[in-house]
Image (cartoon, coloured by chain):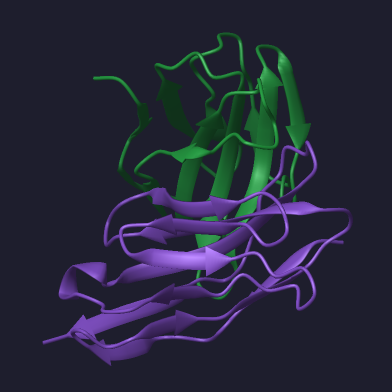
Chain colours: A purple, B green
């Protein structure tokens, strides 16, 4: 079956530090990959996505590249801000399927 | 306002009571979903619906009932609440036109406490 593995949190960084949140997956077929962000007290919002190998999704300074050879979709940002503090979820969906499979989420705390 | 809304946002109930969580979306999206969010588990799919009057089980459907008589509404009912159903519940929707490209949009969530 499908599964998504994310690095354990919380991740605590100083403002302007470089961020990497690791995500690897197991899936049948060729999944689409997503990063969602959840700010405190809110629902999930799509941050970025990639639908085929070597695609790079990007948004708000965040990037992630779909690496089929390593089955990974790591989230990166060059300089984090306090406002980036949130929980980040990696997710996948296979083919035309209806179900998103989520990782357990990684909490990011950015301090001044 | 346009979008996806959930009600109530917070609910406290007792074991054995019936509880219904409401979800409403204004986009006329064909697909709607219910997830629960628990620490250490991320989000798990409870039920989903591809269109009005079409529903299917997700990963953790036991103890829950759904219905979809109208495209815009997708209520989730806990027929006899248990403490293990204490969780945060999220509703989501997406269009079904181009399945590989479409994004799911999430509601703000309902925090449910079962005493």
Q: For this view, does A7 lie left or right of residue B89? A: right
| Displayed quadrant of residue B44 | bottom right
Count up the numbered dots. Answer: 0
Q: Toward which corner of the image does residue A79 lie, by quadrant?
A: bottom left
Is any part of residue B13 visible from this angle? Answer: no
Q: Is residue A83 left or right of residue B11?
A: left
Of B29 and B53, nearer the camera is B29
Image position of A95 (left or right of A45): right
Q: How far from the left and from the top, in percent, is residue B73?
A: 50, 18
Q: Residue at x 57, y 71 (%)?
A: A104
The image shows residue B60 at horizontal and vertical percentages of 71, 52
The picture quadrant where one finds residue B25 is top left
Q: Residue at 38%, 87% (x, y): give it.
A: A11
Q: For the view shown, which residue lies furthest in the left direction?
A: A112
In the image, residue B101 lies at what x, y percent?
A: 63, 36
- Picture layout, residue B83 above or below residue B67: below
Q: Nearer the viewer, residue A6 or A65?
A: A65
- The quadrant of the rendering that contains the C terminus of chain B is bottom left
Q: Position of residue B33 (x, y in %)?
A: 59, 35
Does A71 appear above or below A90?
A: below
Q: Quadrant of the N terminus of chain B?
A: top left
Q: Is residue B2 visible?
A: yes
Q: On screen, B104 above or below A82?
A: above
Left or right of B77, for residue B3 = left
Residue that extends furthest to the front in the rendered view of this protein: A54
Rendered residue at 70%/70% (across/down): A67
> Which residue occupies 21% across, 84% down?
A16
């Amino acid at each position: 079956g499908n599964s998504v593995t994310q690095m354990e949190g919380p991740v605590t960084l100083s403002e302007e530090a470089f961020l990497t949140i690791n995500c690897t997956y197991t899936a049948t077929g060729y999944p689409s990959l997503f990063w969602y962000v959840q700010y405190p007290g809110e629902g999930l919002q799509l941050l970025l996505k990639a639908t085929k190998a070597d695609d790079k999704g990007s948004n708000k300074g965040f990037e992630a590249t779909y690496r089929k050879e390593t089955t990974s979709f790591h989230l990166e940002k060059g300089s984090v801000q306090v406002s980036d503090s949130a929980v980040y979820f990696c997710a996948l969906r296979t083919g035309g399927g209806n179900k998103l499979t989520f990782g357990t989420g990684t909490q990011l705390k950015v301090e001044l | 306002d346009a979008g996806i809304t959930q009600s109530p946002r917070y609910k406290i109930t007792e074991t054995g009571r019936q509880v219904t969580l409401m979800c409403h979306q204004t986009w006329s999206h064909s697909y709607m979903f219910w997830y629960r969010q628990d620490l250490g588990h991320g989000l798990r799919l409870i039920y989903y619906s591809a269109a009005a009057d079409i529903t299917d089980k997700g990963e953790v459907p036991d103890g829950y009932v759904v219905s979809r008589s109208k495209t815009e509404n997708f209520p989730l009912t806990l027929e006899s609440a248990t403490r293990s159903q204490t969780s945060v519940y999220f509703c989501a929707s997406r269009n079904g036109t181009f399945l590989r490209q479409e994004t799911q949009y999430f509601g703000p969530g309902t925090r449910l406490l079962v005493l």
